[in-house]
Amino acid sequence: MSPESIRVDQLSKTYQVPEREGGFGAAVRSFFKRKYKDVKAVQHVSFKIEPGEIVGFLGPNGAGKTTTLKMLSGLLHPTGGSANVLGFTPWELKTEYLRSMTLVMGQRNRLSWDIPAADSFLLNQAIYRLSDDEYKGTYKELDQLLELEPLMKKPVRNLSLGERMKCEIAAGLLHRPKVLFLDEPTIGLDITGQARIREFLREYNRRTGATILLTSHYMADVTALCERIIIIHHGSLKYDGGINDLSRKVAPFKLIGVLLADVDSHDLSRYGTEVQNEEDAEKRYIQIPADEVTRVTSRLLADLPVHDITIADPPIEDVIERAFNE
């Protein structure tokens, strides 16, 4: 068995998408001779993930994130390359593999819409052939972490989005998978709901040692859970490493915020590039190269009536956006 939980080597997926011009004539011609366009969703992606790691899998819409997760969970066959998850080739769909992993997609339902969540949980118990003791023990633990019991008797359609996502995630963990593929698990949730899901995933990882590959457009999910991120763009891997290393690589600057006695009477442009910070409207901020922090801070304190000063890294959203653009 591979020492890594996940190993991906030159994984690729190309779709053949039919295309035609508009109009009745084009529709008739395409009926007899259809034209196809190759769309390269994933191109030669390679990475390794160690047991117990939580890794953020990032990229703009259409980058190939979901396609990659679907290949790793066995839903899609690749066009080229290979993958090994827990010693298995995912698309062979061996029973042992399916019992060892889970795929939770924030925009897809695994629970039946018209019946109580409890019935869907019992169905999963039957699918994974869990004994009553195994099922009850795992359910009790998930209930402690997610407070599921008040939700179990309600039809899924009557649950709020946050309640449904708690049940969706719990349903995917009843068989205690060793690898979790999570595709936007907090999408659409309010701040409290997102925080609750993040807290649960962190605790689940701590208790079980499960490996988690997570996609999310909410950078708070990534910064709270992941020390390492993988970025893909146009189907190709662009970065694999720590978040702080990425910041130093693509955004090697700092933000200095100053609270002045007379806020508007001083020109900060001679110290750096003045920028807006909507989260802290009281201070005025300048952007400077990271290696200039000590010199510029000393000048500000010597030249201006500074009541307060802060030094911060650029927002992670800006760093990720720069990485996408580059």
Image (spheres, rainbow, N blue to C red):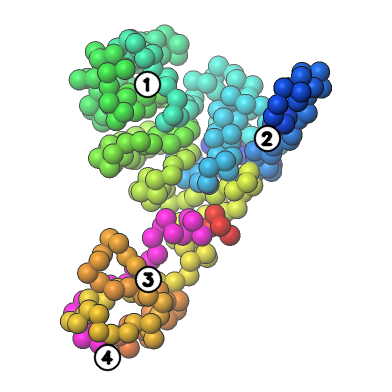
Mark 3 and mark 4 in contact (Cβ < 8 Å)?
A: no
Looking at the image, do the residues carrying marks 2 and 3 touch, with CB atoms under 8 Å apart? Answer: no
Disc 2 marks a residue whose amino acid type is Lys
- Numbered label attached to residue 171: 1
Q: Is residue 125 visible?
A: no
Q: Which comes before the other along the chain, label 4 or label 3?
A: 3
Q: Relative to the observer, which residue lies in front, 98 or 168?
A: 168
The residue that mark 3 highlights is 275
Mark toward the start of the polypeptide (2 vs 1): 2
Check the image and name the residue furthest to the bottom.
303
**Residue placed under numbered mark 2 in the picture:** 13
Question: Residue at horizontal 76%, vertical 23%?
Answer: 25
Residue of label 4: 302
The magenta stretch is 302-322
Q: Is 82 placed left or right of 285 in the picture?
A: right
Residues packed near mark 4 inside 10 Å, few (<14), some (14 to 19) or many (20 plus): few
Q: Are marks 1 and 4 in contact (CB under 8 Å)?
A: no
Instruction: Identify the residue at horizontal 22%, vertical 69% (top origin).
Output: 282
Instruction: State the count of labels.
Output: 4
* Most distant residue in the right direction: 33
Q: Nearer the viewer, residue 16 or 233?
A: 16
Crowding at dot 3, Cα within 10 Å, few <14 / some 14-19 / many 20+, comes out as: some
